[in-house]
Image: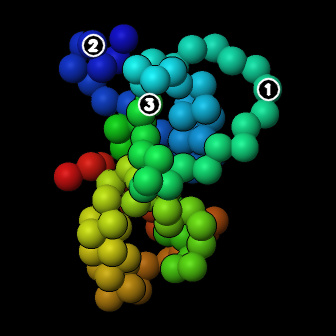
Amino acid sequence: AVRAGGGRVVAVGTTAVRALESAAGPDGVVRARAGWTDLVVTPERGVRAVDGLLTGLHEPEASHLLMLEAVAGREAVARGYEEALDGRYLWHEFGDVHLLLPS
């Protein structure tokens, strides 16, 4: 419904991305579901339900970075992290956040 009206689905946090992507059909429409997921979101898999992500800055070696790259692309994530390092942003739970949108 959001996309049909021209809007975007922006997840808040990586857990929300996994939940939405796990509940999405091949068409990207999210339907009510129950249960557990073992989904790993990677650039190779891509995203269907999510158009953006608001998340904290994760450690450079964290597996979460693959999910960020799936949402916004490798180059955008690398650029964002370079800016964060240069700007001395804070990391993880008590740090800064960034908004990732596909280019």
Quarter-of-image position of residue 21:
top right
Q: Secondary structure at mark 1?
A: loop
Question: Is 24 rendered above or below residue 85?
Answer: above
Q: Is residue 84 left or right of residue 64?
A: left
Residue 37 vertical position relative to residue 103 in the rendered view, above or below: above
Corner quadrant of residue 59: bottom right
Secondary element under disc 3, as helix, strand or loop, is loop
Judging by the rendered image, the residue that carries numbered circle 3 is 49
Position of the N terminus, as image quadrant, is: top left
On the question of residue 10 being in view, the answer is: no
**Residue visible at 40% across and 60% down in the picture:** 69
- Mark 2: which secondary structure? loop
The first of marks 3 and 1 along the sequence is 1
Location of residue 49 in the rendering, given as x and y in whole percent from the top left corner: 44, 30
**Quadrant in which residue 33 is drawn:** top right
Q: Which mark is residue 35?
A: 1
Q: Residue 27 location, x and y as percent?
A: 40, 20
Q: Amino acid at mark 3?
A: Ala
For the residue pair 68 and 86, the one nearer the viewer reads as 68
Q: Badge 1: few (under 14), some or many (20 or more) residues near its Cα, within 10 Å?
A: few
Q: Is residue 93 above or below residue 103?
A: below
- Per the rendering, the mark at residue 72 is none
Amino acid type for the residue under numbered disc 1: Gly
Say which amino acid is labelled 2.
Ala
Residue at the spot 27% in from the left edge and 69% down from the top edge: 75
Q: Nearer the viewer, residue 1 or 28?
A: 28
Residue at mark 2? 4
Residue at point 34% right, 17% down?
2
